[in-house]
Image (cartoon, helix red, strand yellow):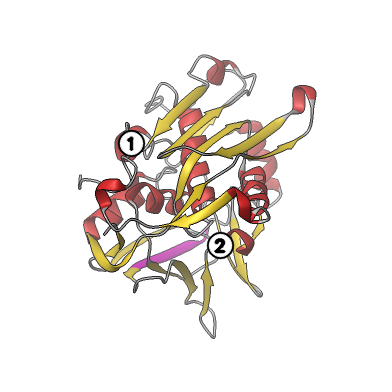
Amino acid sequence: MLAQRTLRSLTRAVGVGLHSGQRVELTLRPAPPDTGIVFRRVDLPQPVDIAVSATAVTDTRLASTISSGQARVFTVEHLMSACAGLGLDNLYIDITAEEVPILDGSAASFVFLLQSAGIAVQTAPKRFVRMLDTVRVSDGEGANLKWAQLAPYEGYKLSFEIDFDHPAVDSTGQRVEFDMGLNSYVRDIARARTFGFTKDVEMMRANGLALGGGLDNAIVMDDYKVLNAEGLRYNDEFVKHKILDAMGDLFLLGKPLIGAYSAFRSGHALNNKLLRHLLEQPQAWEVVSFDDERRAPRGLAQLAPAW
């Protein structure tokens, strides 16, 4: 049987929120089978659990936000991406503020935390959402067109293309295809950092956002170049971060996907619109598990190796 996975032990992290600038503590804890990923706001007078789901997403401006009643947690996508990349199904995430810490701006720190805690195999079958038909959403038209789609594929593959019209971005790779069966999430995707432009950062800070952002947790560019002294981690780091984000956004579905995601200039809003459109078309997907893990698509049955 291809089984569900959780952590072997608990692990903790402390950091600041990218937008709030608030200090925040995370405690990542094992959870029983069929729990899913659950964020728990332990700083509130009465702790509130927020289980991840496509319909729990309540805001997609600049980051993915999930809510339960008045309680919310935002910038969840990098941590969710790490969970997807490592194949974790069940996890409690205690958090002491409303924003997940940005750490180094990528998913690498979360991967390290999760792997340090160890990954445990559980006694329940791992359940996937397998695509049976193509589902597509789009926004805008002409030069402003953005789109994203999910299609049948025996595995999990993501392809993304960006178009920023900026010298520093244009000089790098702008299209990436990542296949869980052929490539390594930890090596090829997890270290790609979020990025922004100085003019946008100044505007966001004037509006009380990006208060925790800086050169130690983001790629920052002026009108011409990358300002980080160490340069880029990958020669196509910008588009790889979009893949990283998409993996986190798509895992908000609550189950891993068997299918192919492709997108052009998509973002958090369109990714969530795609998931909601998918849920409205039950004939386009099915939930499957594997009694024999050898029958599972390549890349979805193996535990990610520890660093």
Q: What residue type is labelled 2?
A: Ser
Q: In this view, does 151 lie to the left or right of 120?
A: right
Q: Which one is in front, 285 or 202?
A: 285
Q: Nearer the viewer, residue 8 or 2?
A: 2
Q: Magenta segment, which residues?
A: 22-28
Task: Say which quarter of the image contains residue 91.
Answer: bottom left
**Other residues around mark 1 within 10 Å, as few (<14) / some (14–19) / many (≥20):** some
Secondary structure found at label 2: loop
Residue receiving disc 1? 181
Magenta span: helix, strand or loop, mainly?
strand
Task: Sort mark 2 into few (<14), some (14-19) or many (20+) by Cα contacts within 10 Å.
Answer: many
Q: Residue at x 55, y 38 (%)?
A: 151
Residue displayed at 38% across by 57% down = 289
Q: How far apart are marks 1 and 2 (CA)?
A: 25 Å
Q: Which disc, if any, is residue 53?
A: 2
Query: What kind of residue is marked 1?
Result: Gly
Residue sitting nearer the eye, 46 or 306:
306
| Residue 169 on image: x %, y % | 54, 21
Residue 165, located in which quarter of the rendered image? Answer: top right
On-image quarter of the N terminus: bottom left
